[in-house]
Amino acid sequence: YERATTTEVAQRLGVSEATVFTYFRSKRELCVRVIQDWYDEIITAIEAGLPREKPVREQLEFVVLTHLRLFLIQGTGLCALVLSEGRKDAGNGGQDLGEGFVELQRRYTAPLMDLLARGQASGEVRRDIPLRLLRSLVFGPMEHMLWEVVITGRQLDVETSARDLVALLWPALQAPGDELLRLRRLRARLQDALASD
């Protein structure tokens, strides 16, 4: 991103640099727009295909699989750009991409946040942890997987990786069963009884 120039972009598109500036005020604005359009495609794919009639775990599998598939199969270059530039702040007068990513990330994570909130409402997802932490629990491992692919260039089996990741995450996300809740209450009562002695 830092080394690319609007002249190079224009040449690759077969237009003049003036044409690029007719539509975009800066390289940053152009890049943010490309990423925004890509995020919109991913959000649309997730929202359109989400099997809402299925249990939350199956919906989560769909979200994870779609996320990994679209990032790794269709957009490795954009994935690398988002991962590297999206974390920078705009401390240099607004030239970094990071400043524009806050709203994009909020919109991008909204389908998962909605799924988790619906899971909490239905009793399938634990309610004792804030949604923002549950969101990070899901997106954090996926980001590490994406970084590994971007850095090493090694491909991974997307479907197996998505299935394995959900198998790992689901026990942490799911609401505890009735028996476990009763055991936790009993433990708390025993601890209180021992503390009062």
Image (cartoon, grey):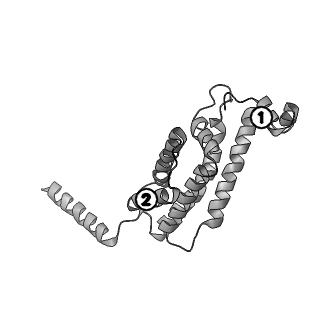
Which residue corresponds to the image point at 65% horizontal and 25% vertical from the top-left? 92
Label 1, residues with CA under 10 Å away: few <14, some 14-19, many ≥20: some
- Vertical comparison of 107 with 117: above or below: above
Q: Nearer the viewer, residue 7 or 130?
A: 7
**Snapshot quadrant of residue 188:** bottom left
Residue 5: % across, % down: 74, 29
Which residue corresponds to the image point at 27% horizontal and 63% vertical from the top-left? 184
* Residue sitting farthest toward the top: 92
Residue 180: % across, % down: 29, 67
Q: Kindly identify the amino acid type of the residue bearing the numbered disc 1.
A: Val
Residue 30: % across, % down: 75, 38
- Vertical comparison of 177 with 38: above or below: below
Q: Nearer the viewer, residue 37 or 107?
A: 37
The secondary element bearing badge 2 is classed as helix
Which residue corresponds to the image point at 62% horizontal and 27% vertical from the top-left? 91
Q: Kindly identify the amino acid type of the residue bearing the numbered disc 2.
A: Asp
* Residue sitting farthest toward the front: 154
The C terminus sits in image quarter:
bottom left
Which residue corresponds to the image point at 77% horizontal and 34% vertical from the top-left? 9
Residue 150: % across, % down: 55, 41
Circle nearer the N terminus (2, 1): 1
- Vertical comparison of 145 with 61: above or below: above
Residue 37 visible in the displayed image: yes
As measured in the structure, the alpha-carbon distance from the residue carrying label 2 to the one carrying label 1 is 39 Å
- Vertical comparison of 154 with 171: above or below: above
Label 2, residues with CA under 10 Å away: few <14, some 14-19, many ≥20: few
* Residue sitting farthest toward the bottom: 53
Q: Which residue is mark 2?
A: 164
Q: Which residue is mark 1?
A: 9
